[in-house]
Image (spheres, helix red, strand yellow):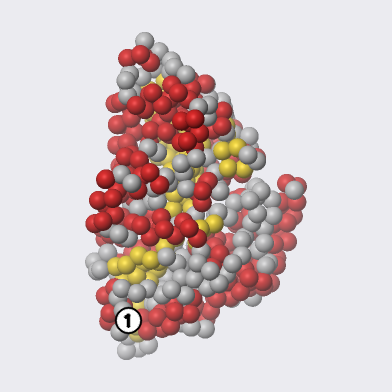
Amino acid sequence: MFAKAIKSAALSAAVAICGALPAQATDLQFYFPVAVGGGAAETIEALTKDYMAQNPGISIDAVYAGSYQDTIAKVITAARGGNAPQLSVALSVDMFTLIDEDLIVPFDDFIKTDEDRAWLASFYPAFMENSQTGGKTYGIPFQRSTPVLYWNKEAFAAAGLDPNTPPATWEEMVEMGKKLVKKDENGNVTQWGVRIPTSGFPYWLFQGLSTQNDVILANSEGNKTNFDDPKVVEALEYLVSLSTEHGVMEPGIVEWGATPKAFFEGQTAMMWTTTGNLTNVRKNAPFDFGVGMLPANKRRGAPTGGGNFYLFKGTSQEQLAAAVDFIKWITEPEQSAKWTMATGYVAPRPATWDTPTMQAYAADFPAVLVARDQLEFAVAELSTYENQRVTRIFNDALAAAITGQKDAATALAEAQAQADAILAAYR
């Protein structure tokens, strides 16, 4: 029989969780958001093929579904049509949406032994904040991240700054940013001091500022936001002031997707973006660069981000058993190390960092440790019920303040009122 013929450690783990896998071939459909930083698509394809080679009775069809937004839309559409994938990587913040849609299965049903419980407890607690609710685990961290600060060491040296010392506070970021701004003979800026994207995922990078100002945007139950808190207003006023008062950042909406290219081309000396861009920056920056934690204000802080694995309803027990086995295998230290090295995403289990592979990589490229070490100060990414509606409201408020349509306090008060109207039903 199939379960007797396969001797791999991965299958042994599956048997421990779910009992013997079936003799017949088990087909899985796996939705994966391909539009992420680094060599994600190639690496996930190689890992999937490795798993199938070790487990020839399991066939995995990896569907590259586009961006995170594309992926969740396709997953929900397929599930409503009775054709849900067995597993998918989707944003950790989509957990409440998937629960509310009654589309996903908690992993707790497959945690039976001490070994299973040890595996579930082996992920960084900061990543589990967006993976668990109501005493159950709905997501398994995979391509997880925090935003970090990248800086151009050559630009720092040219401006008379220590190329090995990034700004540690909001004030230092402004002071250094002013020295880093370069203009041509006509007074046009050719190099900005800093670039914090305000499109794509504006709430996420802004959450770095709000966390540093010692305020949380939403509660852990996903049913209340704090958008109009004075500390949130102060953080937004600081973000706006980088352009309007201090002149260290390009005015208006700063594009997420164009930010790494702007950094490579010397249009900005510093940028905030995901650690998932780390390998991309390493391969493409034509200058020596540094990576640091986000600068602090009242405290250090950053949100976690990125994607989790989810299991979907409408799936047979045999398929769920195989899906859990695959998720356990791909989050094991050696596979996780390959993923982190290929993409820059934070390996979600401490054990990965203890492998000889990862230790050698970190010794050669210490920047990979920054996002991991920042987890000590990290908070859960903004996530609520009806998350897409609520974050759209918040993003619109940020845009209104950034573009000068409204002052920060007014924009955030209106956003809070709208969020309250949506979330009141979930309290």
Residue identifier under label 1:
161
Residue 390 lies, in percent from the top left, at 64, 54
**Image position of 42 (left or right of 413):** left
**Image position of 399 (left or right of 1):** right
Residue 30 lies, in percent from the top left, at 43, 33
User: Dot 1: what SS?
Assistant: loop
Residue 378 lies, in percent from the top left, at 51, 58
Residue 239 lies, in percent from the top left, at 53, 73
Q: Residue at x 52, y 73 (%)?
A: 297
Amino acid type of the residue that numbered disc 1 sits on in the rendered structure = Leu
- Callout 1: 10 Å neighbours few (<14), some, many (20+)? some
94 vs 261, nearest the viewer = 94
Count of marks overlaid on the render: 1
Q: Residue at x 63, y 39 (%)?
A: 135
In the rendered view of the protein, which quadrant contains the N terminus?
A: top left
Q: Is residue 157 above or below residue 411?
A: below
362 vs 327, nearest the viewer = 362
411 vs 51, nearest the viewer = 51
Q: Is residue 219 above or below residue 235?
A: above
Q: Residue at x 55, y 54 (%)?
A: 380
**Image position of 142 (left or right of 231):** left
Q: Quadrant of residue 368?
A: bottom left
Q: Quadrant of residue 258?
A: bottom left
**Image position of 348 (left or right of 340):** right
Q: Residue at x 47, y 36 (%)?
A: 118
